[in-house]
Amino acid sequence: MSNPRQRSIIKVFRKFSNSLGPDSLHFLEGILDEHDISDDDIESSIELLAKEYNKEDEATMKVKLDVLQRVYESLQDRGDHTQVEREIVDPESHLFFIDAYEMPRWVWSQERGTFERSSEKLSIPGTAESRVTSMRDRLNIIKQCVLRNEHFAPSTLPSRDRERLVTLKSTKQLLGRAGERFLLLGMLAHNKEGKVCLEDSDGRVELDFSKLDEPSEGFYTDGCFVLVEGEYTEEATLDVIAIGTPPCEPREVARSIYGHIDFLGKGATSLLEDKQHAIRIQEEMSDIHFFCLSDVWLDHVQTLPGLQKLFDNCVENEFVPKVIVLCGSFTSKSIAHGNARDIQRYQDNFDSLADLIASYPSMTRSTHFVFVPGPLDITVNSVLPYRPILSTFVTKLKARLPKVHFASNPCRIKFFNQEIVIFREDLMSKMLRHIVGVKPDVKSEDMKRYLVQTILDQGHLCPLSSHIQTTLSDFDHTLRLYPLPTTLILADKYDRYALTYTGCHVFNPGSFVGRNLSWSAYKPAEANSEECTLDLDTED
């Protein structure tokens, strides 16, 4: 039976897909004893050895003792390794822009109870199997969070009789048990008769909301997953007594379990590395900012003058952002298919923007410009996730800007330990159009909070049925919000807002339209955003 120190050593090496024999394990224990390493510092010390071991050409999954000894001696020769970590770090080397179509696909394995990387080649049409798998993954990921959440209990849902509710049940367990009370987890949908029902992996049951006083906070749309408490009836329906969204799992909890999984395809980091990166960002990079603008209508008479004034202010005040995210739509009206004049104007507007940005050499050299397509922009596909803007329209931007990125929608930015998700969609109106139930007398501020809560609780950027919002099933994982990102930018034509929910900062930068041009400045050192407004002079 291994002792706690041995289990810590095995855990660290297992994260790197390594296994340890008895000799290697005893050797590592001896190192810990020799240097009097405390239990709290075991993982950080062993992790350094594991990383260095896996850099060796002779490294194998089953750790070789002679290679491990050589690695240890090499570290000894370097001196105190705790001081090596403090070398100067270039932020550029820790800044990644991740296209949705570059993300590896991880699927949930019921047998192993964890994620497995899919080896199948992804395709745009997808398959019938991938369409089922994508929905099943959504359910299983939410379910494992619900079952693991320490605050989850029947009492967390408003109920008149909570004592008999003990565990989650499935729809197949309802048969023959009329008059009993159940707690179910499933997806809201409509049956052929147009009635609301709850679906899970075993079947479906029709819901009766007549006895429900009011739902818990959040939006309940066709396609979202909910926890439902109710009584099964002789008519094979469930009289709903309470309904709520599943509890959201904090990023730290998910990372502590799945930190070894490289969801973004840019290399996995440990929790210790995340903490070290967070400290460095706070201490050494407090002056770094990311700007985010949405609805940058290049055909609007005030947009380019507004951008010019914004850039002037940045240069004059020596406040040049590290990243500027420009979200579409980059046109105020849809472009008719085959309309040569509109298409040419669309390209000319991008060319004018290229000339404007290139006239600011300091920004051109140091700032990354990210273009995210909106609903009216011309892309290859009209199904989520959207491809980047067609390259034929942005040739001049690519030629004149050395740090330009034409991203998919959604896309992600990885900056040290932070994951920033950017999604340009008029999500508020889309969710409200397909609502199943919402708390009465909802105010505007509550609407914003409900939207954020629903999206993060669902762990998905678009929790709607496939007949409402079609997604590419092979790429549905790119819309997943698990583990929770550090920051989520929901660029929407709806009113701007900024709030933090379960540790995830969410904001809508508003529209960069009109005389009061609005955008948001995100500060990685604080993982927080600030609303900014630019007033154009009346004569502009």
Image: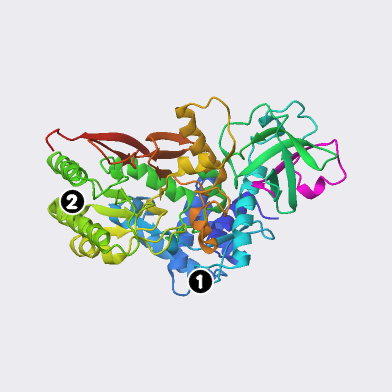
**Magenta extent:** 166-191
**Mark 2 neighbour class, 10 Å CA radius: few under 14, some 14 to 19, many 20 or more:** many
Element under label 1? helix
Numbered label attached to residue 105 = none
Residue 355 is situated, as x and y percent measured from the top left of the image, at 15, 56
Q: Amino acid at mark 1?
A: Asp
Report whether 338 appears left or right of 15.
left
Instruction: Name the residue at 13% across, 54% down.
Output: 361
**Relative height, residue 173 to residue 12 (above, below):** above
Instruction: Name the residue at 31% across, 44% down.
Output: 292
Element under label 2? helix
Q: Earlier in the sequence, mark 1 or mark 2?
A: 1
Residue 502 visible in image: no
Residue 105 is situated, as x and y percent measured from the top left of the image, at 52, 62
State the residue position of label 2: 363
**Relative height, residue 339 to residue 41 (above, below):** below
Distance from Cα at disc 1 to Cα at disc 2: 51 Å
Q: Is residue 212 magenta?
A: no
**Mark 1 neighbour class, 10 Å CA radius: few under 14, some 14 to 19, many 20 or more:** few
Numbered label attached to residue 66 = 1
Residue 326 is situated, as x and y percent measured from the top left of the image, at 30, 49
Residue 457 is situated, as x and y percent measured from the top left of the image, at 56, 41
